[in-house]
């Protein structure tokens, strides 16, 4: 077995095989996020070639956000039943098929089918739940670090692929821009097929940080989850006010990030005379700040009141969105926006996860957070379609930016409707 041989080789050099699992999972989530962000660079090229309005394209992209979120709560069951390797490989095959087939699309329904349905399902299978499952199965220590690294993978995907995609669109057309992500899907799929294993015992190991003298054994499932388990958890969580506060603020989080900036930023810059390549470079700058901000947020969430952290994250994001239309889209103005906005793009995830675990317990936190994340993606879908509609009707994105900024300020205040963690535990 190739994975077993690699595990022995790494062990001789002082490395645990779990870090190989983390590396491949990181690449999987990076590739998935790159595919999700790619349509943002294609809005104007598709509109010019096919004559589709911005709101028509945005409506198809909104579907992918909805599916990306709704599949998340059920992804853990798929991984439990079919294993990590099968789920990852199937997801990457779906994403790769969407990318390569999209180069041949000619009708609007092709866009809905490929960029909406297929991409939404494929990316939803590799959402944040994948990172949580890997961290819990393969690590007894440093789980927070692992989750922070895997969460930051979306920023890395944007950092690497969007500037390259914008350059390819400008020089070779939008069809060439999908090939780097397609190749990445194929390579990562091969790595996952060869090396991903479901549990440490499959390579004769214990989880990282556990007692190495314990004889590894196959995990015994005390309860086999059914397809109805996420719905039961949702029904129970919905009776808790904390769930609705976190779901509502995370809805605003998606409204003000993935659906708005990730989808429409390059098109927005085009309205102000900024070409796709420098606009994508600003997005990459946001990704760099976000990578640092998300890992730092995980460190801060272990030490400070998570409600206060979310207050500052949402507040600064709202102010930065109010600033963006007045930045004059100069290097200085966009750099200032990229810094403040980028630092808290996904920095909201670690405090939200910790507040979820405090309110609902570690056993149910993953699935409850899956539903909270579904609200995040519903917010993304609303912004993706709403901002496109605003651009078509009013010929400007400014109302969408102001509305998202105001919503962020509302989220900053609403987060204090959650009691202090000490009071919640009591």
Image (spheres, rainbow, N blue to C red):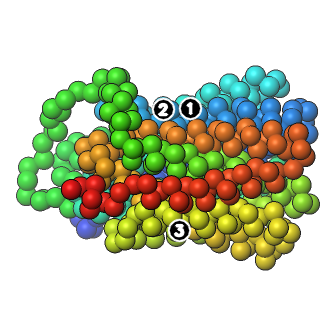
Q: Earlier in the sequence, mark 2 or mark 3?
A: 2
Marks 1 and 3 sit apart, C-alpha to C-alpha, by: 30 Å
The front one of 205 and 394 is 394
Disc 1 target residue = 67
Give the quadrant of the C terminus: bottom left
Give the quadrant of the N terminus: top left
Is residue 328 among what the camera can see? yes
SS under mark 1: helix
The front one of 411 and 348 is 411
Residue under the image location 76 percent in, 49 percent down? 400
Residue under the image location 68 percent in, 53 percent down? 404
The front one of 51 and 65 is 65
Q: Vertically, is 197 above or below 298?
A: above
Residue 267 position, x and y percent, is 82, 51
Q: Vertically, is 29 above or below 333?
A: above
Residue 312 tag number: 3
Marks 2 and 3 sit apart, C-alpha to C-alpha, by: 30 Å
Quadrant position of residue 98: top right
SS under mark 3: helix
């Amino acid at each position: 077995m190739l994975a077993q041989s690699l595990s022995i080789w790494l062990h001789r050099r002082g490395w645990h095989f779990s870090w190989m699992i983390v590396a491949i999972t990181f690449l999987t989530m990076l590739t998935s996020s790159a595919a999700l962000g790619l349509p943002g660079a294609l809005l104007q090229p598709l509109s010019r070639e096919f004559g589709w309005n911005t709101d028509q394209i945005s409506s198809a992209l909104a579907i992918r956000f909805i599916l990306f979120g709704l599949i998340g709560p059920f992804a853990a069951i798929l991984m439990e039943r079919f294993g990590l390797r099968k789920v990852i490989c199937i997801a990457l095959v779906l994403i790769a098929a969407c990318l390569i087939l999209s180069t041949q699309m000619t009708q609007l329904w092709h866009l809905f089918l490929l960029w909406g349905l297929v991409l939404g399902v494929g990316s939803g299978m590799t959402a944040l739940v994948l990172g949580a499952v890997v961290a819990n199965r393969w690590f007894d220590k440093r789980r927070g670090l692992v989750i922070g690294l895997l969460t930051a993978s979306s920023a890395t995907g944007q950092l690497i692929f969007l500037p390259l995609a914008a350059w390819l669109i400008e020089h070779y057309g939008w069809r060439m821009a999908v090939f780097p992500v397609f190749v990445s899907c194929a390579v990562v799929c091969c790595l996952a097929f060869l090396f991903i294993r479901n549990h440490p015992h499959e390579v004769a190991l214990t989880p990282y940080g556990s007692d190495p003298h314990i004889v590894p054994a196959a995990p015994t499932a005390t309860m086999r989850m059914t397809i109805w388990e996420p719905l039961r958890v949702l029904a129970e969580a919905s009776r808790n006010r904390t769930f609705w506060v976190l779901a509502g603020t995370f809805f605003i989080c998606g409204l003000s990030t993935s659906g708005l900036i990730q989808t429409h930023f390059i098109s927005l810059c085009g309205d102000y005379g900024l070409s796709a390549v420098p606009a994508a470079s600003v997005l990459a700058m946001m990704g760099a700040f976000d990578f640092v901000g998300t890992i730092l947020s995980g460190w801060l969430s272990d030490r400070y009141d998570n409600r206060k952290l979310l207050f500052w994250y949402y507040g600064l994001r709202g102010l930065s969105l109010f600033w963006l239309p007045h930045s004059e889209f100069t290097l200085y103005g966009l750099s200032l926006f990229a810094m403040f906005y980028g630092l808290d793009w996904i920095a909201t995830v670690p405090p939200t996860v910790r507040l979820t675990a405090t309110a609902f317990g570690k056993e149910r936190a993953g699935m409850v957070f899956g539903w909270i994340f579904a609200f995040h993606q519903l917010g993304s879908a609303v912004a993706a379609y709403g901002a496109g509609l605003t651009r078509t009707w009013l010929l400007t994105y400014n109302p969408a930016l102001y509305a998202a900024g105001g919503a962020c300020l509302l989220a900053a205040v609403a987060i204090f409707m959650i009691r202090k963690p000490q009071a919640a535990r009591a």
